[in-house]
Amino acid sequence: MEKIQYPHIRLTDILRAFWNGARRYKLRLAILIGSVSAVGVVEIIVPLLYKRFFDVIIAATDKVQTAQVLTEIIVYILGLNLLIWLFYRIATFADNRFLTSVTAILRQNAFDYLIHHSFSFFNNNFTGSLVQRVNRFARAFDRLADKVIWQVIPLFLKIVGVGVVLYLYKPAIALIMLCWALLFLLFNYLVSIWKLKYDIRVSEADSKTTGVLADTITNHTTVQLFTGTVYESRNFRKVTEHQARTHKLSLDISSFVEAGQAFLIFLIEFFVFYVTIGAWQAGTATIGFFVLMQAYILGLTHRLWEFSRVVRDLYESYADAKEMVEIMRLPYEIQDIPAAKQLDVKNGKIEFKNVSFGFHKTREVLHDFSITIAPGEKIALVGPSGAGKSTIIKLLLRAHELTKGHILIDGEDIRSVTLESLRQSIGLVPQDTLLFHRTLKENIRYGRVEAVDEEILQAAILSHSDEFIKELPLGIETYVGERGIKLSGGERQRVSIARAILKNPPILVLDEATSSLDSHSEMLIQDALDMLMRGKTVIVIAHRLSTIRKMDRIVVIEKGRVVETGTHDELLAKGTGLYRRLWTLQAGGFIQDGAQMENISETTEPLLANEDGGVSADEKNANALKGHSAP
């Protein structure tokens, strides 16, 4: 797994990504902010009425008149609290609609960008980690918006409002409160910047733990078959212990921050009341002013105390969103050039011209590889493991960019056409078929999403998928499980063939399309494949040599170069050659017995392995003779 170099992400990059999802709901956002601001303003006014209430009681001489005034004050307080309730309800409903809509859009934006990344990008990332990044990105906005709207805006209004009111009464106290609030905010800012790197480490550790967990669960069969439960448990314990240490350090820092905030709140209580008592002794402050100060201090310290969590959540949101924004700012490795045109395949001629490619600078897979496939020609690619057969197909599909050379389809360089039109023109039946956790109908329809039910059923019949579908309780509406785990290898292969039949592309690639089938099933499907290949340009990647006798031409590849080419009979007619050795090894498509196998030269043994180093062709044939597919 190669390490991906992600771009440097700033806070403005994250805010821009969030705004891309939020800007279409500007009206809802305006209503939300307006309602929250109205609540904040009214909350500044209410303590003034309480001040008035207690000042009236202290100065009362006529109880009847005083009671009338107090009643009026209470009515005003009730009215203002009713306004707070009303604006709060409006803000809550606006918040529900705004956040749910925007988080859905952000999740979709993240998915849409992620899904267009290259094959190598996904090969170099844990599936679980990518899923976690998408989900945390949307949740980060939810948390950020919630804190800014419900905490930061009210805090700003509270500081400004309290400062203005106190300045009108006691400028000295207003100055003390303002300086203290700024000190509190500065303290939070500095420690939060310091803590940010630890929050990022927590997010990275969380992603790694999720990735290891998902990877192990995905490969649970391998773990059990190789008795790897103890090893995997030990490996998972390492990452969870690292995650726990990282999280513990982050929590310890948070506790330190809260201790500092508590000390600052104690200081403001002491200084403000010390100054206020002096003003009361001098006759310039009333009991009502004490009540006003206490209400303001309680309200302000509550907001500022919550601000510590706000800052922490803001930076945690930054850390969570940063991982996804990195991906969204990472340029696509494979993408359409400007003004790329649609590929319209009329003939299906394919040309590889001096193609070179390597996954690493020191590991060249293909070197000056050149072949021309005529329109409607059916060729087979044969060669040992690592010869470059699968790489040729990946390059044809533009899964990777060429190091050198050109690939042309009907004279068009595949780099000059859109990826979508290129891949729509090529049908692939892979050796290992993975299905969606959806119904059989949906999986077959993936070949052509606009296909009607009758076409899907016809494709199932032609691929002989209907034979096992009829045995299922829900038939074609049966869910196949994650990656198609509820189906056998042969059944998944037939679904893949049904997809290709439904797609009906002008160019067809069969990567050992019958590798997971027993002899009986292979015989049934061969007719469907013959019909599917009719009138198309076909490339067959062959490991089982008995499946390629009908090909127009066989191309034998070794170490990224063409070493032989010709028909089956022409290649066998040669006295020596790689293809003849392979064919002799399999004795006309059937497995030699053990004594004969022992006499085969060591130099030919690797030639039977498939491109991915999986089950060899002789093992597959042996299993086929037993009446079941190779694992």
Image: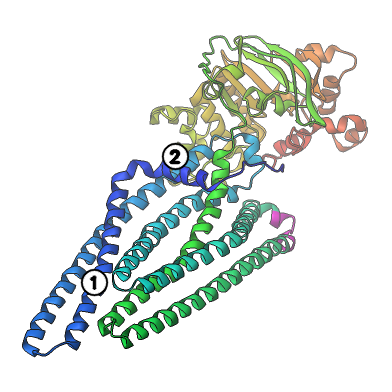
Residue occupying image coordinates x 23% and y 61%:
87
**Residue 537 picture quarter:** top right
Q: In the rendered structure, does residue 229 fall within the stretch colored magenta? A: yes
- On the rendered structure, is 231 left or right of 414? right
- On the rendered structure, is 26 left or right of 234? left
Q: Is residue 552 above or below residue 186?
A: above
Residue 578, image x and y in percent? Answer: 85, 21
Which quadrant, please, contains the N terminus?
top right
436 or 518: which is nearer to us? 436
Q: Which residue is mark 1?
A: 46
Nearer to us: label 1 or label 2? 1
Q: Which residue is mark 2?
A: 476
Which quadrant, please, contains the C terminus?
top right
65 or 213: which is nearer to us? 65
Residue 22, image x and y in percent? Answer: 38, 45
Secondary structure found at label 2: helix
Binning the other alpha carbons within 10 Å of mark 2 as few (below 14), some (14 to 19) or many (20 upward) gives many
Q: In the rendered structure, does residue 437 fall within the stretch colored magenta? A: no
Q: Which portion, as a residue range, is magenta?
A: 223-231
Secondary structure found at label 1: helix
